[in-house]
Image: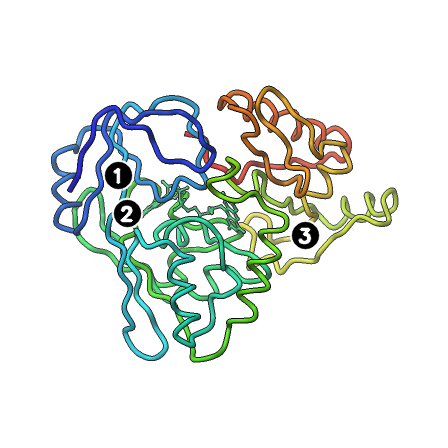
Amino acid sequence: MQAVSNYPIPNTFGIDAKAKLFIEYYSLDELRQVLTEHKNERILHIGQGSNLLFTKDFDGVILHSGMARAKFLDDETVEAQNGLRLDDMIAQLTDMGYCGLEKLSLIPGEVGASAVQNVGAYGCEAKDVIERVYTLDVETLEEHVFSNAECQFGYRDSAFKHELKGRYIVTSVVYKVKPGDAVKTREEIIETRNGKLPKVGEVGSAGSFFMNPFVPAEQANALLALYPDMPHFEVKPSNNLKQSQTTSNYIKIPAAWLIEQCGWKGKTLGGAQVWPKQPLVIVNANNASAQDIIDLAAQVAASVQEKFGITIRPEVNYI
Ligand SMILES: Cc1cc2nc3c(=O)[nH]c(=O)nc-3n(C[C@H](O)[C@H](O)[C@H](O)COP(=O)(O)OP(=O)(O)OC[C@H]3O[C@@H](n4cnc5c(N)ncnc54)[C@H](O)[C@@H]3O)c2cc1C
């Protein structure tokens, strides 16, 4: 394992924040050792830092996995270790003539977080292709396997973000695949994404800053009377919403449309900017501080609330 003090925390926003201690481990035994040695400290396990906004230095231990291998369990399942970049795995599977995950192509981040976040794009979510998730219990140091259903996946959501948060580290994920040609789909998705999303390493961002809101059908219909062109999608509540929201119908409204209607496309605040090609994304355009990004996001959300009466919530995790 490698441990470095006062280490700049990797994050795709390009925010300067340091970890008191940054540790990369290369086996489950090393992970157990780290957890034992730092039992009483604040611990955060990160992947590529592509969905995180560090608001200050981290006064604790940042953990990262250097385990990055994948293997076929049989012809229909692949087990990938938490530190493998999701897109590297998809590229390899596509080259080998396997399909199933190609719509998730080019989503930044690692295998571990793909299950935590239930990443998704172009109508496919990780939950559609995850069979089970292997974890290490931070308290008992024992392995625990979660079935797909036990992960309680929702829209960019899972139990690992709620009741299981901080208790389990995802160590590997078993994905369902099947033989098939996904080369063309992958190429098209890469082209589309490169055309509208900031490229990691070139422009700092965490991808979509906000989640798409689900509003009660009644409210959506009232808005449609005022804005007949408003894009809207019916959702199957059981797929995307918490139990408490399943009693009435909900409509998904793209947050990007709401933000654009409020005139935010391309607007800046300090070094932060609403990305001109996709207003759902906030970028670090010019040495932004975390506060610039927080303030811009708050102003965007406030204006959507004022104009449409809709609350949009960050997808990005503030740390
Ligand atoms: C340009 C860009 C485009 C993007 N496009 C999309 C998109 O199309 N769809 C989409 O869904 N997302 C998208 N994202 C967001 C991001 O890629 C995903 O949220 C991704 O899953 C984050 O992975 P990561 O490894 O960087 O995790 P991090 O950002 O490092 O961590 C995310 C969360 O997972 C936790 N975590 C990480 N690893 C583990 C682990 N092993 N065990 C337990 N918890 C863990 C962290 O503590 C944190 O809470 C985009 C981001 C960028 C920058």
Q: Which amino acid does the dot numbered 3 rest on?
A: Tyr
Q: Residue furthest front?
A: 202
- Residue 250 numbered tag: 3
Q: Earlier in the sequence, mark 2 or mark 1?
A: 1
Which residue is labeled 1 in the image? 63
Image-quadrant location for residue 298: top right
Of residues 313 and 30, the one drawn nearer to the viewer in this rendering: 30
Q: Is residue 21 left or right of residue 77?
A: left
In the image, taking residue 156 as reference, residue 10 lies left or right, namely left
Name the amino acid type tagged 1.
Leu
The residue positioned 62% from the left and 56% from the top of the image is 192
Given contact means CB atoms under 8 Å apart, are the residues at marks 2 and 1 in contact?
yes
Residue bearing the label numbered 2: 169
Circle 1 SS class: strand
Instruction: Mark 2 and ligand 1: say if the CB distance to the nearest ligand atom is below 8 Å.
Output: yes
State the separation of the CA atoms marked 2 and 1.
Answer: 10 Å
Q: Is residue 137 above or below residue 289?
A: below
**x and y, in percent, of residue 237 in the image:** 60, 57
Q: Nearer the viewer, mark 2 or mark 3?
A: 2
Disc 2: CA contacts within 10 A as few (<14), some (14-19) or many (>=20) = many
Dot 3 and dot 1 residues touching (CB under 8 Å): no
For discs 2 and 1, the disc positioned in front in the rendered view: 1
- Among numbered discs 3 and 1, the one appearing first in the sequence: 1
Mark 1 near ligand 1 (CB under 8 Å)?
no
Residue lying at 85% horizontally and 44% vertically, measured from the top left: 227
Where residue 121 sits in the image (x, y, percent)?
Answer: 56, 57
Q: How many marks?
A: 3
Query: Helix, strand or loop at disc 2?
Result: strand
Residue 137 marker: none
